[in-house]
Amino acid sequence: MRKKEWRDGNHMKFESAHATFNRQVDCISTGNVIGHVQLSGFVRPHCEIECNGFTNPPGHLQEYDLNWLMKDFPYFVKDWIRENDSGKSVIAYEFRYWKNGEKYPIGWVVTSEDYQLLDSWVHGTKKAGSALREAIAYITEGN
C-alpha cells in the first residue's frame, strides 16, 4: 500500500494523468470513507445475519449495505459483489471528481477486507484509468 504524502493540511499529494482529479484529492484511504473524491464502505456477505442483537434474513444486511451508502453505484458493481460473495466482507469504492457541482465518476474498485484487489472498473478516458490505477495503489496491498 502506497504511503500518503501531504501537499498541504487538507490535500494529499496525488499524481496521475488526470489533473482535475489530482487537484481535488483530499485523502484516499481504506474502509468506510465519505470524502470529496472517494465514497467507500464495507459490504457484508450474504450469509451474515446478526447485527446489533437482531437476527436478519440472509442477504438483508448485504442489501442494506449496497442500497444505503452505495445506492448510486452502478448495477454491475453491485451484481459483481453479490455474484462473487465469498462469505467475507468486501470494501466497495467509488472515485469521482466534481465540476460545477456535478459528480463525474472515474471508476469503482472492490477489495477484500484485507485490502487485496478483487476487481475494478474504469469509467471514462485514459486519464480516468490513470487516476484509478493510482488510487488503487493507496487502498490495496501488494498491487
Image (tube, rainbow, N blue to C red):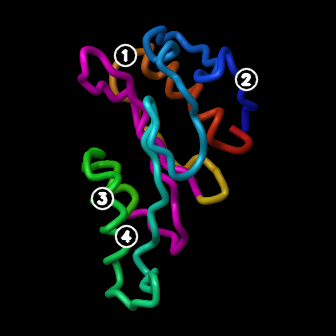
Q: Nearer the viewer, mark 1 or mark 3?
A: 3
Query: What residue lies at 33% left-to-right and 51% top-to-bottom?
Result: 70
* Crowd rating for badge 4 (residues with CA inside 10 Å; few <14, some 14–19, many 20+): many
Question: Distance of mark 2 from mark 1, alpha carbons?
Answer: 26 Å
Which secondary structure type mostly characterizes the magenta part of the structure?
A: strand
Numbered label attached to residue 5: 2
| Disc 2 crowd, CA 10 A, few/some/many (<14, 14-19, 20+) | few
Q: Is residue 86 magenta?
A: yes
Locate residue 2, reporting x and y percent: 73, 32
| Inter-mark Cα distance, 1 to 3 | 28 Å
| Callout 1 crowding tier (Cα within 10 Å): few <14, some 14–19, many ≥20 | few
Left or right of 3? Residue 119 is left
Q: Which residue is mark 1?
A: 125
Q: Which mark is residue 52?
A: none
Taking depth in this image into account, of 120 and 39 the one nearest to the observer is 39
> Along the polypeptide, which appears first: circle 3 or circle 4?
4
Q: Which residues are magenta?
A: 83-112
Q: Amino acid at mark 1?
A: Thr
Q: Which of the two discs, 3 and 2, labels the residue nearer the N terminus?
A: 2
C-alpha gap between disc 3 and disc 4: 10 Å
Question: What SS does tag 4 mark?
Answer: helix
Q: Secondary structure at mark 2?
A: loop
Assess whether mark 2 and mark 3 are in contact (beta carbons under 8 angstroms): no
Provide residue 5's location: percent of width, then percent of height: 73, 23
Which amino acid, mark 4? Gln
For residue 68, which numbered disc appears in the image?
Answer: 3
